[in-house]
Image: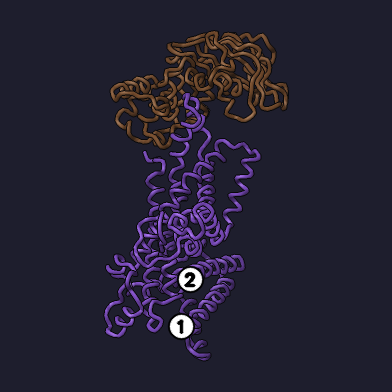
Chain colours: A brown, B purple
Amino acid sequence: MSKRIDVKDLNVYYSKFLAVEDVNISIEARSVTAFIGPSGCGKSTFLRTLNRMHEVIPGAHVEGEVLLDGDDLYDPAVDPVTVRGQVGMVFQRPNPFPTMSIRDNVLAGVKLNNKRISRSDADALVEKSLRGANLWNEVKDRLGRPGSGLSGGQQQRLCIARAIAVSPQVILMDEPCSALDPISTLAIEDLINELKADYTVVIVTHNMQQAARVSDKTAFFNIAGTGKPGKLIEYADTTTIFNKPLQKSTEDYVSGRFG
Amino acid sequence: MSSALLKTRRSQLTKGRLPGYAIWVVLGTAVVLAAAVSALIGFDVLVWALIAAVFFVAGATLVTAAAEGRRKAADSLMTYLVYGAFVIALLPLLSVIWTVLERGLPGLSYDFFFTSMNGVTGATDNASAENGTPVLGGAYHAIVGTLQITLWATLVSVPIGLLAAVYLVEYGRGGALDRAITFFVDVMTGIPSIVAGLFAAALFALLFGPGTRTGFVASVALSVLMIPVVVRSTEEMLKIVPNELREASYALGVRKWRTIVKVVVPTAISGIASGVTLAIARVVGETAPILVTAGFASSINLNVFGGWMSTLPTFIYYQILTPTSPTNIDASTQRAWAAALILIIMVMLLNVVARLVARIFAPRTSR
């Protein structure tokens, strides 16, 4: 249950402002793809176009095509809610629902949509999702406690469990480790490596070592200057990007000469 | 040897500081001096306390200035002025509570809570005054009226206010409708309560003929006063729900209205509930709009949709303005104060409820 993503000639706008220009990229199913680049280059914006989350911001719209296994996400007949059910997302800051227990947080995708689920199915789903997020052993004795009582790293894994509980095809992660300490980061990175067996994972990161550690392919985004649109500069195997990039700016960035 | 020395000598770091007992010396001196001065001009406790306070602030400032310098003196002067302002702000409140307790408690009895003014006439009051028997008559009808009218006002205004706030925060995007609602809510906040009463009276006069006065008309008048308060407080509460929670919900494929109903409102519910309770506390004491909409009754009426009703404020108003027995007004005065005490207790209970509700619904963060 994972799908590939093909993006063709995508421009992303905030009202009239062109934020990301002319992206063409193909993301394989069951792989980890990292987006790297300096701040403000549009990698987060582009990531959010992959499940139409950028539409939450008034005035945001796109031109071009995003194909999920050949189906265009931006077809006028497509409901963004359906898209988000297939393409899950994990955010920069852990954001468990403060009114819900750990268990209810995992079941949020089911319960908020008012789907009926039997108690035994729910228990099974909670355990499967929490195991999938490497959190089960830490929280199995306190599933009824509030999710906001966990540590930052645990909260982030809870958010990942919540995302995989709705069995998406793709999981997008927007700098999932930037608010975490190195130990929690390691736990998330291990988890990403396991997730790619079942899901297509796309991760935005500012940490180049992290991109090198977890991803199969890496896309480098850059921006010519403030007010100019961000562009996809280079997209290749992670080893190529970090060892023999074709573009000069990619080499400068990954070797720490700028950014 | 050096440790023995350290024990006996004063620390270099506290040099030039007044010792702790200095303030009490100044206070004692100020009280004694003030007693002397007030004795000269005619003794009175209030004058004594006032002069003592002035002497104390001046004396403490001067002593501090001499011993510790200008900066410390300014600091202590300001500290005492702030405390003084606090006491002055508290005095009227304490005075009100004291007066109402003192005059209201004698009138509180089981009968006062559970009988109405039905059949209580001037003759009854004259008889109880002459024979020294307990004052008859009670505020049962007014208590029931207050509860019913306020309940209906809440039922009318909470859905409207809540939905308006949800529209403003979640759907409005600074458009014309958005700004118009905000503007009119602000205007409504400033409407005098009698105008709200006249509005409700006129509205029901148009719909059901002139002179339509029932408890429900009063509820509508009160809801005109409540709606802006509910909208404002709910709006503020919804605004502080982090956007991340909405995004987290959308990212799980949850529709916008479900996100609002199941994530946004529950997260803000404690603030919304206490805002609503405070809005109720605000209107429960209204008098003028009740008089023009619900009229006044001295017997029990449990039907908000028919017949005149009275509430605690209108009960107090009539007991004071038109005593039941013109020759023995003490009975009516006592009933009015007892009703005032019940009203204050009601408002206090509502405030306690608001705090409890806020605590019960608050998102749990404990480990």
Chain ID, mark 1: B
User: Which percent across, then down, holds residue B249?
Assistant: 47, 29
User: Which percent across, then down, holds residue B182?
Assistant: 60, 46
User: Which percent across, then down, holds residue B307?
Assistant: 40, 59
Q: Is residue A106 visible?
A: no
Q: Is residue A153 visible?
A: yes
Q: Name the kind of residue labelled 2 in the image.
A: Pro
Name the residue: 64% across, 20% down.
A62
Vertical order, B68 against B219 (above or below):
below
Label 2: few (<14), some (14–19) or many (≥20) C-alpha neighbours in 10 Å: few
Cβ atoms under marks 1 and 2 closer than 8 Å: no
User: Which percent across, then down, holds residue A121?
Assistant: 31, 21
Name the residue: 53% across, 45% down.
B236
The image's mark for residue B92 is: 2
Residue behind mark 1: B45
Vertical order, B55 against A104 (above or below):
below
Chain ID, mark 2: B
Helix, strand or loop for disc 2: helix
From mark 1 to mark 2, how far is it between C-alphas? 17 Å
Q: Is residue B355 left or right of residue B207?
A: left
Vertical order, A218 against A157 (above or below):
above
The quadrant of the picture occupied by the N terminus of chain A is: top left
Residue placed farthest to the front in the image?
B209
Name the residue: 54% across, 10% down.
A71
Name the residue: 59% across, 26% down.
A55
Q: Mark 1 or mark 2, which has the lower sequence index?
A: 1
Front residue of B251 and B208 = B208
The quadrant of the picture occupied by the C terminus of chain A is: top right
